Amino acid sequence: MRARTRWLGLAMLTAAMWVGGARQAGAQEFADREKLRAHSAEFRRNIIEVTDGVWVAVGFSNANAVLIEGDGGAIIVDTTSDIGDAAAVRAEFAQRSSAPVRAIIYTHAHPDHTGGASVFAGRDSPVIYAHQLFVDRVPDVGRNGRDGGDQFGTTLPDHLFINAGTGLEFGRSPAPTGFLPPTRTFAEPRLEQTIAGLRVQLLHTPGETRENIAVWLPDKKVLLPGDDFYKAFPTLYAVRGARLRPIEQWILSLGVMIDLGAEYLVPGHTRPVIGSGEVRTALTTYRDGIKSVLDQTVDGMRKGERPDELVRRVALPPALAASPYLQEFYGTVAWSVRAIYAEFAGWFDGNPSRLFPLPESDRAARVIALAGGREHVLSSARAALAAKDFQWAAELADYVLAVDGKDAAARRLKAAALTELGERQISAIARNYYLTAAQHLLNGLPQP
């Protein structure tokens, strides 16, 4: 059994103690962290029977895998992260169906959905379906290790790690991939097939990725949306470094899925949603949440508001903000606003003093001089830290580090501020990035 599985069991057993400790320590200061900890319940390890002949494996890997049993054959939708996870899921699926695998469907190209294909294929030689953009896509150029940060927390020690937002973990226990390339692609909006006696519709639904497809089983009323829906506010922008997701297409894709009238919604991450009314609510809420952030941001841009102003003003309407489907366990509204601004208006915010700004190190040196020197800046940073003004403490440390990136006192101060910020996040991405960056700053420093 892998370390993450053992950790999840311990986390679920001790969650109440953590929550109780946070309350005793002073009220709501760590409330968001405890919400994120409770969110780990979405990744409880289960094989869930969605409806007759459809099972989803949750919690075995960062992404779900789905078994659909047909007449004399089976379909696998998404294949987990790696061959170890896939082997565990296949053993469970074998207890439900012994039918040969006739098809594997990749909803999109993220490696947590494609890494176990060889295990499920076995000797069955299934057709492997994907959208043509799966093959033609522009590779992601984001760097997980940028500035020592990592949105997935892959190097965090276990006592600091909670979850990855849409799964128990991503990349913390690397294992060999069993990826197999698609053997059948399509470029049209829809591909209809009969596989193992089942009517299957593959719908091109750009969203979290441009190649995402939704799998629709019209006779079973089962919808598999890939990563266009999961139980967390979506990553319209990934801080690891990536393009803004095709947000306007994502809104349209959710509209297409709403109109199907599904009774079962089986996302690529988190647990399924059951019942036609609840499925419609989930998808409609998701669409309206994304659209609200887009509309508010564009409206503010037309009024001349800059990114910092927009971030302070744009928020989900109260009813949407309260929805269990839009909690900021993964993406955040603030990051989405900044990414939308950059996509629609570029890097320049309209302030002419920022057309050719001073180099960061030059600006920092001048600010430090104005503040009375390095020691005064560090003293102010310590005072801010003591006053729980963690963001300001980190920014003050940044001025010193811009002049001397090896300054041990500034590194320790910034690491302390980032740790405090990380411990107060509801977003797993924000938490993991803060805490990993803090660990990176402390690496190689002597004990104080």
Image (tube, rainbow, N blue to C red):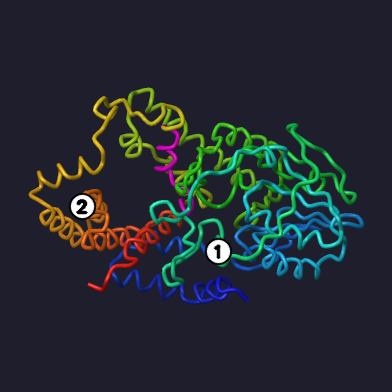
* Residue 73 coordinates in the image, percent (x, y): 88, 57
Q: Is residue 92 left or right of residue 297?
A: right
Q: Is residue 72 left or right of residue 330?
A: right
Residue that label 2 marks: 400
Please determine whether, in this image, residue 297 is positioned above or below residue 111.
above
Q: Residue at x 32, y 67 (%)?
A: 444
On residue 168, which mark appears? 1
Q: Is residue 7 left or right of residue 435?
A: right
* Residue 43 coordinates in the image, percent (x, y): 58, 63
Q: Residue at x 67, y 66 (%)?
A: 85
The verdict on residue 333 being magenta is: yes
Q: Is residue 31 left or right of residue 59?
A: left
Q: Nearer the viewer, residue 249 or 344?
A: 344
Q: Image quarter for residue 393?
A: bottom left
Tell me which amino acid carries mark 1: Leu
| The C terminus sits in image quarter | bottom left
The 10 Å Cα crowd at callout 2, few under 14, some 14 to 19, many 20 or more, is many
Q: Residue at x 73, y 32 (%)?
A: 189
Tell me which amino acid carries mark 2: Val
Q: Residue furthest right?
A: 72
Identify the main secondary structure in magenta.
helix
The 10 Å Cα crowd at callout 1, few under 14, some 14 to 19, many 20 or more, is many
Q: Earlier along the polypeptide chain: callout 2 or callout 1?
A: 1
What span is in magenta?
A: 328-341
| The N terminus sits in image quarter | bottom right
* Residue 331 coordinates in the image, percent (x, y): 47, 48
**Which-is-in-front pick, marks 2 and 1?**
2
